[in-house]
Image: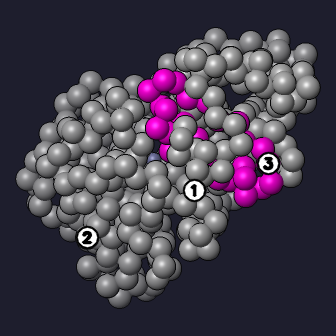
Amino acid sequence: MKAVVKYAEGKGNIELRDVAEPNVEANEVKIKVEAAGICGSDLHIYNWDIGIPTRVPFIIGHEFSGIITEVGKNVTRFKGGERVTAENSRLVCGHCRYCMTGNYNLCTERKATGYAFDGAFANYCVIPEERVHLLPNNVDFITAALSDPSACVYHAIQELTGIDTGDIVLITGAGAMGLFSVQYVKANGGIAIITGLEKDVKRLVLAKELGADVTVNISKENLSEMVQEMTEGKGVDVALECSGSEDAAKSCLDLLRRQGKYTQIGIFGHPISFDLDKVLYGEIKVIGSFSQKYTAWDAAIKLFSQGKILAKPLVTDILPLEQWEEGFSRSFEGQAIKVVFKP
Ligand SMILES: [Zn+2]
Ligand SMILES: [Zn+2]
């Protein structure tokens, strides 16, 4: 089968290879991949500034959907033929404090599909039964492939941050995380302000279509003035930093009201300077959000089925695996919002 393989550590070192189809273990299912999206963290795998454990060589890709073609001998929930998607948490210890409380995304032993185990930029992948989610009939494969980013945002907003009706929320970064954030903020009855750069103009237009109240092109417009005006100089109630940019993190902190909530969703890939005196003086609540877990997946898929959260408008490019390089470069340049491969 064809697979996009990260074959060595360091920047780049990725190629399309012919590899053997994976064998299914007793507790695993084999999935024929129907759609697999490029995630921001896949770009960090390309640049090799990823903080998530990896084991080269590995097949990249963890946001996907497909059809089960084979099941291991101990599998009880599936027979084969089911339409599914799957979580990327793969190996966890199963007995630490985090595993025992269902927070296995934080298990220190956690190894993930598409990082330390072969992923979904391939014709087939194998996944442990307990990480597989059945798709409702009305959720198509392209939408389902974006369950992971939607679940990440569900985890960040619904499970960790909490937004009240009427909260004014600043979202920095108009990538997939930012665009899902807009939708979750609106679903909670909040007011969504989203920022982007000149290269994100297309994304900001989409943000507006998805319900953003205010879009700000920070290359041209004065974000601070706009926020001061909207909040009568008080600052926003919540800031969701989705870009992984130091300047954006600073803006979020500067524009938050006292006792406001700051949530980090984007990955920087390197240490940044962040003024903790401002956190102290303003009694700011700083929240980190990493990956997701079963509860967020279950909810994200249900919300797709109910049509309350949309994924397809984010998908700008559908490419065959052979064009993986094109997909990555369109993602890096920001021309694409979400690239999905159809292997
Ligand atoms: Zn992802
Ligand atoms: Zn554990």
Q: CA distance from mark 1 to mark 3?
A: 19 Å
| Residue at position x 42%, y 42% in the image | 337
From which residue to which does the magenta span run?
A: 174-203
Which amino acid does the dot numbered 2 rest on?
A: Lys
Residue 269 visible: yes
Q: Kindly state the secondary structure of the residue where label 1 is placed.
A: helix
- Residue under circle 3? 190
User: In screen coordinates, is 261 left or right of 120?
Assistant: right
| Residue at position x 87%, y 47% in the image | 166
The relative height of residue 47 versus residue 109 in the rendered view (above or below) is above
**Quadrant of the rendering where the N terminus is positioned:** bottom left
- Residue under circle 1? 151
Which amino acid does the dot numbered 1 rest on?
A: Ala
Decide whether residue 312 is among the magenta residues.
no
The answer to the question of whether label 2 and label 1 lie on touching residues, with beta carbons closer than 8 A, is no
Q: Kindly state the secondary structure of the residue where label 3 is placed.
A: loop
Res 199 quadrant in image:
top left
Which amino acid does the dot numbered 3 rest on?
A: Gly
